Image: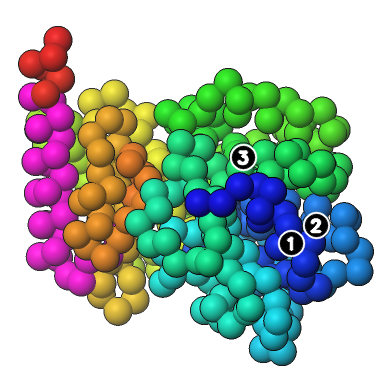
Amino acid sequence: MNTFDEIYEKIKEYPTIIIHRHTSPDPDALGSQAGLARSLKLAFPDKKILCAGEEVGDLDWINAMDEVTDADYQGALVITVDTANTPRVSDQRYDQGDLLIKIDHHPDVDPYADMSYVDPEKPAAAEIVYDFLKAEKLPLPKEVAYPLYAGIVGDTGRFMYSETSPHTFEVAAELANTGININEIARNISDVSLAQAKLQNSVIDLMKFDPSGAAYAIITQEQLKKLGMTFEQASVTVSTPGRIKEIMAWNVFVENPDGTYRVHYRSKGPIINQLAAKHDGGGHALASGAKAKDLDEVKQVFEELVEVVRDYNNEHRTNK
Ligand code: AMP
């Protein structure tokens, strides 16, 4: 792990800086990427600062990607934000630069970069980027604050999830003080289309519950097609079951066009990222993702979740 100062020294050195984030971007991936890029552009108008990654779909209100050529990577500094492991870096040319720096808030299971700043206790990569910009006295006007605030609101579940700290509120207040429209950002993050609302309802309808407090739902390709929704738009359903008191941890499985499944894990207490790691995945202690090749693996994933929730319940009963 490096210090902010060490990372800033490298930023000052390189004429081209390319910033990557993870695939299937969420507001924190895009917000931390955009916040860092915009501030560096203001501080260093003569440098080439680029945002790399696949198109961003419904989240284009946060930021747009730049065109990045192979030649841009020659002698460049590459920074990844919010991306724990290499298969999840959006645009796999991330390793074509001269030096690679990782800035992240996931557990550092894959220390793939030459330099890094990783703090899994932070609720959002955008909060780390803010701390970095602040520490190095880099510009933090409205256009930088807007995506950073979106990242924080997104990854904290609107200041609800467990890593949200008094510091998070201080950062949010300072970002809000720039004059950004925090109401618009909150709305952009929380509003869903009618089709998404219908899918959220059917996730609850179709949810299977174990008495332990574990639950799961499967979203099929057929459902997605019927609602005219993309795979990415389906991810809005993942947090919905968390509002149900009886549910302690849950899986949402989304079928891919090839019949495999994207697996979402969420939890209010039991640690689930070690389960995700067994299925080609990973993530945070209470929010992870993985893959399942077929319905047998879907069943296995859920059985493992039930076991972890039961253990958690037993432990907590004993400790009371
Ligand atoms: P998701 O369920 O896709 O919203 O992901 C929840 C968290 O797990 C995010 O922080 C992701 O970065 C992480 N994650 C999702 N899928 C994977 C994966 N296949 N490998 C590692 N981490 C993942």
| Sequence-wise first label, 3 or 1 | 1
| Residues shaded magenta | 289-314
* Residue 12 place in picture, x, y as percent: 79, 61
Q: Which mark is residue 40?
A: 2
Q: Is residue 297 above or below residue 192?
A: below
Query: Foreground residue, 252 or 46?
Result: 46
What secondary structure prevails in the magenta region?
Answer: helix
Residue, x 25% and y 44% (percent of image)? Answer: 272
| Sequence-wise first label, 2 or 1 | 1
Considering the numbered disc 1 on the image, is that residue within a helix, a strand or a loop? helix
Residue, x 76% and y 70% (percent of image)? Answer: 14
Q: Quadrant of residue 131?
A: top right
Query: Foreground residue, 244 or 221?
Result: 244
* Residue 10 place in picture, x, y as percent: 71, 62
The residues bearing labels 2 and 1 have C-alpha atoms spaced at a distance of 9 Å
Q: Amino acid at mark 1?
A: Ile
* Residue 191 place in picture, x, y as percent: 59, 42
The residues bearing labels 3 and 1 have C-alpha atoms spaced at a distance of 19 Å
The answer as to whether callout 3 falls within 8 Å of ligand 1 is no
Question: Is the residue under label 1 in contact with that under label 2 (CB below 8 Å)?
Answer: yes
The residues bearing labels 3 and 2 have C-alpha atoms spaced at a distance of 16 Å
In magenta segment, residue 296? yes
Considering the numbered disc 3 on the image, is that residue within a helix, a strand or a loop? helix
User: Which residue in the protein does label 1 denote?
Assistant: 11
Q: What is the crowding at mark 2: few (fewer than 14 residues within 10 Å), some, or many (at least 20)?
A: many
User: Which residue in the protein does label 3 denote?
Assistant: 127
In the displayed structure, does residue 129 sit left or right of residue 119?
right
Q: Is residue 75 above or below residue 171?
A: below
